[in-house]
Image (cartoon, grey):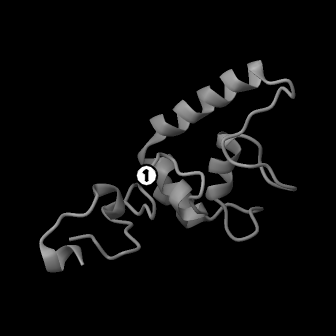
Amino acid sequence: MHRKHGIDPNPLYKLGMGRVGCMPCINCNKAELFEIARRFPKEIARVAEWERIVKMASKRQAATFFPTARNMPAGIDGWVEWSKTVRGGQQYDLLKAFEFDNVPACSSAYGLCE
C-alpha cells in the first residue's frame, strides 16, 4: 500500500518491527523483542533501569515490564535472553546468537527491504 501511494513506511517496519507505537511494545512477539534488543540496546537498558526504580518503590519488591508467567523469566533482561532461544525457551538458537552480533541489513516481515 505504501509503494502504491508513494509513501515511505515508518523506518521501524523495515527493521522487523510489527508494532511501532511504543518502544518496546508490551505486546511485541519473541522475534520483535529479539530485534529490539540487538538493534536498540539502549531501549532495553532504559526499561531495565525503570524496572529497578519501580522495584525499589514497590510493596512487593517486584516490577517487570512484561508480565510474569510460570516458567518464564522475570525482568526485561530475562525476556531478552528468552528471545534468543528456540521454541520452548530452553535452548539457544545458534543462528540467532550469531545474528545478534552481526545485524543483517533487513529483517522486515512485510518485505519492505530494498
Q: Which of 85 and 44 is in front in this view?
A: 44
**Rendered view: 38 above or below 1:** above
Quadrant hosting residue 31 = bottom right
Give the amino acid type for the residue marked by disc 1 in the picture.
Gly
Q: Is residue 20 left or right of residue 111?
A: right
Give how far across and how far down residue 99 sits, in percent. 47, 59
The 10 Å Cα crowd at callout 1, few under 14, some 14 to 19, many 20 or more, is few
Q: In this view, does 114 lie to the left or right of 19?
A: left
How many numbered discs, if any?
A: 1
**Rendered view: 38 above or below 94:** above
Indicate the quadrant containing the C terminus: top left, top right, bottom left or bottom right. Answer: bottom left
Give how far across and how far down residue 42 sits, in percent. 46, 34
Measuring 53% from the left and 51% from the top, which residue is drawn there? 25
Q: Label 1, on which residue?
A: 21
Secondary element type, mark 1: loop
Measuring 36% from the left and 75% from the top, which residue is drawn there? 110
Q: Tell which residue pokes out farthest to the left in this image.
A: 6
Measuring 75% from the left and 19% from the top, which residue is drawn there? 57
Measuring 67% from the left and 21% from the top, which residue is drawn there? 53
Indicate the quadrant containing the N terminus: top left, top right, bottom left or bottom right. Answer: bottom left
Give how far across and how far down residue 98 sits, in percent. 50, 58
Give how far across and how far down residue 20 sits, in percent. 41, 55
Q: Nearer the viewer, residue 58 or 49?
A: 58
Quadrant hosting residue 102 = bottom left
